[in-house]
Image (tube, coloured by chain):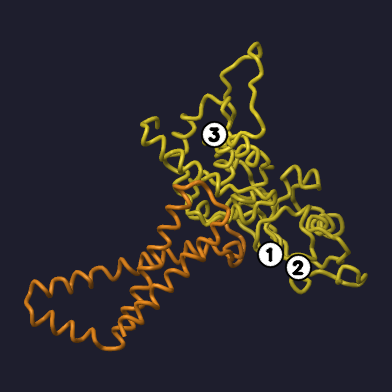
Amino acid sequence: MAGDDKDATLSVGVWRGDADGGEYVEYSVPHRASQTVLDVVTWIQRNIAPDLAYRFACRVGMCGSCAMTVNGRPRWTCRTHVDKVARNGRLTIAPLDNLPVVRDLAADMAPFFEKWKRANGAFQGGETRDDPIAEVRPDEPERKEADAAIECINCGICYAACDSVRWNPDYLGPAALNRVWALHNDRRDVARDDRLAAIGGEGGCHLCHSQAGCTAHCPQGLDPSGGIAGLKRALFRAALKGTV
Amino acid sequence: MSMVRTVGAPHRRQVLWWAFLMHRVSGVLLALFLPFHFLVLGFAIKGDATLDGFLAWTENPLVKLAETGLFLLLAVHLAGGLRLLALELLAWRSWQKNMAALAAGAALAGALLFLGVAW
């Protein structure tokens, strides 16, 4: 294995630039065993380019802040092993696609979260602390649907892998719609019809072409594409009933 | 500034993206064919001789081959549309990739059947 060879080096192209543009800069990085892509970026920053901007926090695949484009695909870099993605000792690392750039590898996540707000992605309960706690059984079908969708870590990988976002920047995107799907299956929520109306119009779920790049790339193994299909069905039923 | 900084599009290398592309391309090509279809229908209004002349021309093996291609486009577009309807209106199925493959297979089988009948 290349990672066991102490003299092995990786040739790494790192996108350097800002909101006005940029280019790939080449670095040579020692190849180590069990090295992650985040390790590579950190090595470059600590040893060659202290001004390299990137973002990370937990390093164990929980916080969702280290997502970057690695060899053309969006990935969580802290849990992506170099040996799995390098081709002939070569890596290219860029910020996430479909988002503006702050600097270097740090994408500007503002539009991503703006769309969560636009999709009405906050829980809206109808009860107070004085009411008894709602009983939601873990084996209810709706609860199971919501269970899968709430594991999202907001990394933005699905958003970067989505051609519908690429072709129409107004589109809410898979993450915001996955959030709506989770809330749609939460019967304690009182704004479900309003939320369906919010995602049924301009920039809404009907822009999804079911290419399922989101599902193919989600590091958590979630299925936003399935959730979006569920929302389309829910909207269809609501339109027939006349509630949206 | 463009928000796409990667070269190529490796994220598209998956079967459902290709299913999307086949559906889109077959739809565009069928739309381009439609005016010619109406033109031939127009021959029937013009008179028997023009239409018969055209129908004789369609016996040409190359035209038959082109017709088979046309049928393949129609079969691909129909199967792709049925796949989308199933995907979006029926409860979600995780074996949708198999459906995409099945749709492509059915389209191809249909086209080959047509080839056999037409020749």
Question: Which residue is drawn at the image coordinates 38% and 75% (left, top)?
Answer: B111
The Cα atoms of the two marked residues, 3 and 1, are separated by 36 Å
Is the residue under label 3 in contact with that under label 2 (CB below 8 Å)? Answer: no
Looking at the rendered image, the quarter that the N terminus of chain A falls into is bottom right
* Chain given the colour orange: B
Q: Which mark is residue A227?
A: none
Q: In this view, does B40 lie above or below A191?
A: below
Comes first in the chain, label 2 or label 3:
2
Q: Is residue A38 above or below residue A117?
A: below
- Label 1 SS: loop
For the image, the number of numbered tags is 3
Query: Is disc 3 surrounded by few (<14), some (14 to 19) or many (20+) residues within 10 Å?
Result: many
Marks 2 and 3 on same chain: yes
Is the residue under label 2 in contact with that under label 1 (CB below 8 Å)? Answer: yes
Q: Is residue B69 visible?
A: yes
Question: Which residue is drawn at the image coordinates 41% and 34% (left, top)?
Answer: A238
- Mark 3: amino acid: His
* Chain given the colour yellow: A
Q: Which chain carries label 1?
A: A
- Label 3 SS: helix
Q: Mark 3 lies on which chain?
A: A
